Image: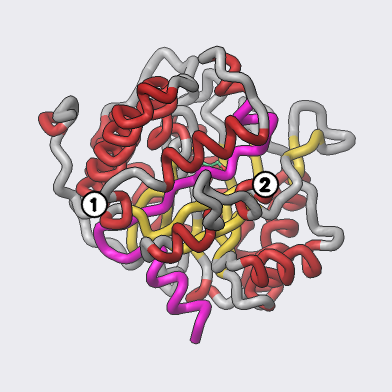
Amino acid sequence: MQLEETARLLVAPERGILAADESSATIGKRFETLGIPCTAESRRTYRELLFTSPGIERYLSGVILYEETLKQATQGGGRFVDLLAERHILPGIKVDGGAKPLAGHPGEFVTEGLDGLRERLIAYRDLGARFTKWRAVIAIDSARPSRTAIQANAEALARYALLAQEQELVPIVEPEVLMEGDHDQERCEEVTRAVLNRVFEALRDHGAHLEGLILKPNMIVAGKKCPIQPDIAAVAEATLRTLRQSVPAAVPGIAFLSGGQTPERATAHLNAMNQSPASWQVTFSFSRALQEPPLGAWAGRADQAALAQKLFSHRAHLNSLARMGRYSPTLEGAV
Ligand code: 13P
């Protein structure tokens, strides 16, 4: 079955996923801090730099694109989707319309984009996409998330997943419990478990084919402003415990988001999790933790492109090692 085969390829050993699907507004903010003008051409140039980096096909199984990029081409005129496919990297597409304030629930969000999704999915598939992503955002503090926010996002994720599977596109189901706030690790675990349980209940209710989807969760960390930060082993242990309690073994793989962790921490956490056997593949689907080093080095300067590509390939390599439990911090800085 095509869905299962695509899902297996996405979480194949030694490989993980690059999330390069930042909306133009989100990448605009990242460009702005580095003084890079944000235009369709600067976004195209940057993404060409990433996708043509030497050796990345050994470490990346897929790249999640934003709609604009799905339709863009290299400077030489070849479509990005074809370039990736030639490198045996599956092209995917972010299909949600972004997290919007949830009416009646201040500080909470619901992801929009279900209207007309079937037609968009058909168009994306015709353009060469093989998989998709939908991100739900769960805000966390002592009173949040509400049951309503969890419920609304779980339902939307399930409806999206079914629509994607209908078009033979693997859905990456991403319920992200945010790192913003001062909550402790225990609270993150409690909330993440509740969210994942509700998401899988909705997926089952709607009839999702669990063997043909990928889960993209947050790791179980403390809020960025929490004075007590768990060490690497504690994050790995709590994350695996939470996932074992909530994620059915039928799901072929879990591909983590990095969520604002430093690149080194995200890699170390992934590595620690891959020291123990699990019933699903455990890999990465990072945006910031893969892109921060190359984006900072490039900063819009053509003469820095080769260095940026080296840093990107190196980061992808380290995550590939971590995905197999073979990373060591001593490998940092080898560029
Ligand atoms: P981060 O790795 O920067 O959290 O991004 C992952 C992602 O794709 C968010 O939707």
| Front tag of 2 and 1 | 2
> Where does label 2 land, which residue?
68
What percent of the width, then of the height, locates residue 55?
Answer: 26, 50
Tag 1: amino acid = Asn
Report the residue that reaches farthest toward the bottom: 1
The residue carrying pointer 1 sits among few (fewer than 14), some (14 to 19) or many (20 or more) residues within 10 Å by Cα, namely many
What percent of the width, then of the height, locates residue 156?
Answer: 74, 57
All told, the count of numbered labels is 2
> Where does label 1 land, which residue?
274
Query: Is residue 171 in view from this perspective?
Result: yes
- Quarter of the image for residue 155 reads bottom right
- Horizontal side of residue 17 vs 67, given as left or right: left
Q: State the residue in front, 295 or 153.
A: 295
Q: State the residue in front, 226 or 5.
A: 5
Q: State the residue in front, 53 or 219.
A: 53
Secondary structure under the numbered disc 1 in the rendered image = loop
Q: Residue at x 77, y 45 (%)?
A: 148
What percent of the width, then of the height, locates residue 279?
Answer: 32, 67
Q: Residue at x 49, y 45 (%)?
A: 19
Is residue 97 one of those drawn in magenta? no
Report the residue that reaches farthest toward the right: 104
Q: Residue at x 38, y 49 (%)?
A: 284
Rounded to the nearest angstrom, the CA distance separating label 2 from label 1 is 35 Å
Is residue 12 one of those drawn in magenta? yes
- What is the magenta range? 1-28
Query: Is residue 245 in view from this perspective?
Result: no
The residue carrying pointer 2 sits among few (fewer than 14), some (14 to 19) or many (20 or more) residues within 10 Å by Cα, namely some
